[in-house]
Image (spheres, rainbow, N blue to C red):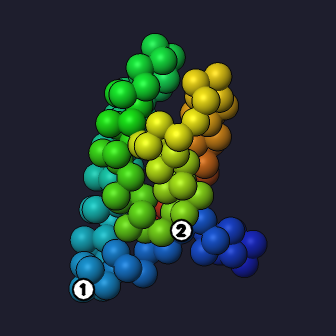
Amino acid sequence: MNEVVEKIATELYSLEPLKEFLGNDDEALYEVLEQFMESSKENLVFLENAVNERDIPEVGAIAHRIAPMFRQIEAHEISEILKVLEKNDFETNDLTTIWNSLKTKIDFLFEALNNEMV
């Protein structure tokens, strides 16, 4: 990984807590990350539907469900957005903008994680 990508990745998330939790087992780490990304992608489909339907309680429930793993890998920006959605701490008019920001950040995070797992 080149230095610029590595610097961005270290600001975006940290796998250290998860690595420690998994006993520094790289194979287990990659398995957990793959599961995390797969289940997150599924949940993001549900979240997008809830956003489009303006189903605020469902948006909060989904954000609550997916937030712990993002916190676990210290993806702070994403965690903060999920916290806002979870607590319904936003104007309904801003929901689409918040969703778009979240989706962009998660796509970028998953790209970085995929690069790290190569």
State the residue lying farthest toward the top: 53
The circle on residue 87 is none
Question: x, y (%) of residue 45?
Answer: 41, 28
Q: Position of residue 82 (x, y in %)?
A: 48, 47
Q: In this picture, is 16 found above or below 117?
A: below
Under mark 1, the amino acid is: Gly
Q: Secondary structure at mark 2?
A: loop
Q: Quadrant of residue 40?
A: top left
Regarding mark 1 in the picture, which secondary structure is present there? loop
Q: Is residue 49 visible?
A: no
Compare residues 55 and 45 and report the one nearer the observer.
55
Disc 2 marks which residue?
13
What percent of the width, then of the height, locates residue 86?
42, 43
Q: Is residue 37 left or right of residue 81?
A: left
**What's the residue at 38%, 79% (across, down)?**
17
Quadrant including the N terminus? bottom right
Residue 8 coordinates in the image, percent (x, y): 68, 68
Label 2 sits on what residue type?
Answer: Tyr
Badge 1 is on which residue?
23
